Image (spheres, helix red, strand yellow):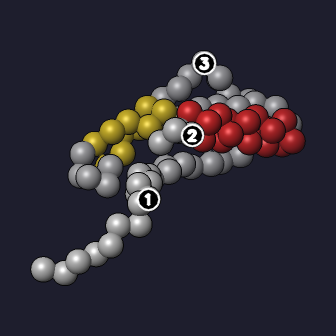
Amino acid sequence: MMYIPSTGQIPKPRYALNYGLRLDKGTASELTHPHVPILLPDGSVGNLTLHVMNGTADEIKSQLLDSIDALFDMYADA
């Protein structure tokens, strides 16, 4: 049996980030959040909620960056 010394570090969990982006002219209903089925890495099926952001390109970019920061804040302890 091979001895592998412990590094004392706890391995960090691995994740998959699923996303899709499209910038359309005009506005869309921000109240509609359709769900699409996705195949997860473990073979199970999950749902992904599609979110709508309206505004100028700069406003949407700001909202998107805030959302990304919030997502990683939620998983900060992971």
Q: Where is residue 21 in the image (x, y as percent from the top left)?
A: 62, 48
Under circle 3, the secondary element is loop
* Residue located 19% across and 81% down the image: 2
Circles 2 and 3 in contact, beta carbons < 8 Å: no
Mark seen at residue 76 = 2
Q: Which amino acid does label 3 sit on?
A: Leu
Circles 1 and 2 in contact, beta carbons < 8 Å: no
Q: Where is residue 25 in the image (x, y as percent from the top left)?
A: 77, 40
Q: Which of marks 3 and 1 is nearer the N terminus?
A: 1
Give the number of the mark in front: 1 or 2.
1
Under circle 1, the secondary element is loop
Q: Earlier in the sequence, mark 1 or mark 2?
A: 1
Q: Which amino acid does label 2 sit on?
A: Ala
Residue 39 relative to residue 26: left or right = left
Q: How far apart are marks 2 and 3 (CA)?
A: 28 Å
Residue 20 relative to residue 46: left or right = right
Q: Which amino acid does label 1 sit on?
A: Gln
Mark 3 is surrounded, within 10 Å at the Cα level, by few (under 14), some (14 to 19) or many (20 or more) other residues, namely: few
Residue corresponding to mark 3: 31
Q: Position of residue 73 (x, y in %)?
A: 62, 36
Residue 7 relative to residue 75: left or right = left
Q: Where is residue 66 in the image (x, y as percent from the top left)?
A: 73, 36
Q: Earlier in the sequence, mark 2 or mark 3?
A: 3
Which residue of the protein is positioned furthest toward the left in this rendering? 1
Which residue of the protein is positioned furthest toward the top in this rendering? 31
Q: How far apart are marks 3 and 1 (CA)?
A: 44 Å
Residue 66 in view? yes
Q: Distance between the residues labelled 1 and 2?
A: 17 Å
Residue corresponding to mark 1: 9
Under circle 2, the secondary element is loop
Q: Identify which residue, 69 or 3, lies in the foreground.
A: 3
* Residue located 24% across and 45% down the image: 44
